[in-house]
Amino acid sequence: MPEPYIPPVGASIKSLQEPEKKMSKSDENRSIFLLDDADTITKKIKRAVTDSGTTIEFDESRPAINNLLTIYRLLTGKNAEECTEHFAGKGYGHFKTELAEVTVEYLRPFQERVKEYDDETLRSILKPGAERARAIASETLKMTYERMGIA
């Protein structure tokens, strides 16, 4: 039986507005989407809730800042200690600005690649795959019908 791989960090990214809930694609204002432009990403991160504390450090009792730091950690590849040290003595405004910049830069290569594909190019990629899938499915369906005595 396959065992799931659940990463120790970032298995569940939380909502930017309600850090007790997971980030959801149905919640446009509280989630960051792969194709959000830089301004939209920045606005969403700057509006993200933070806790009443003043330090930027990982603390399970402060889910909002913990969530934002987890995102930062995942996107930069830094460990928890490096993240905490990097933002020592800095405020939430500085942190959110840097998180927005890191997020925009992290998504940039993906977004640029997506822009390379127009509808015609996508169709030319998808058509051969659909034909291969149709051929395989046809054989499987034929075998199923034969075994059921329908063919």
Image (cartoon, helix red, strand yellow):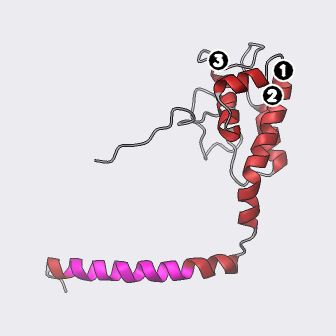
Q: Which residue is mark 1?
A: 91
Find out whether the residues at labels 1 and 2 contact each other: C-beta distance under 8 Å. yes
Q: Is residue 136 magenta?
A: yes
Q: Which residue is mark 3?
A: 62
Other residues around mark 1 within 10 Å, as few (<14) / some (14–19) / many (≥20): few
Against 66, residue 104 (above or below) is below
Q: Amino acid at mark 3?
A: Arg
**Mark 2 and mark 3: Cα distance apart in space:** 16 Å
Residue under the point 71% across and 26% down: 82
Other residues around mark 3 within 10 Å, as few (<14) / some (14–19) / many (≥20): some
| Secondary structure of the residue carrying numbered label 2 | helix
The percent position of residue 64, horizontal first and vertical second, equals 67, 24
- On the image, which quarter does residue 123 sit in? bottom right
Q: Which mark is residue 104?
A: none
Q: Earlier in the sequence, mark 3 or mark 1?
A: 3
**Mark 3 and mark 1: Cα distance apart in space:** 15 Å
Q: Earlier in the sequence, mark 2 or mark 3?
A: 3
Q: Amino acid at mark 1?
A: Gly
Q: Nearer the viewer, residue 128 or 22?
A: 128
- On the image, which quarter does residue 113 sit in? bottom right
**Mark 1 and mark 2: Cα distance apart in space:** 6 Å
Residue 135 located left or right of residue 115: left
| Secondary structure of the residue carrying numbered label 1 | loop
The percent position of residue 34, horizontal first and vertical second, equals 69, 52
Q: Give the magenta range.
A: 127-145
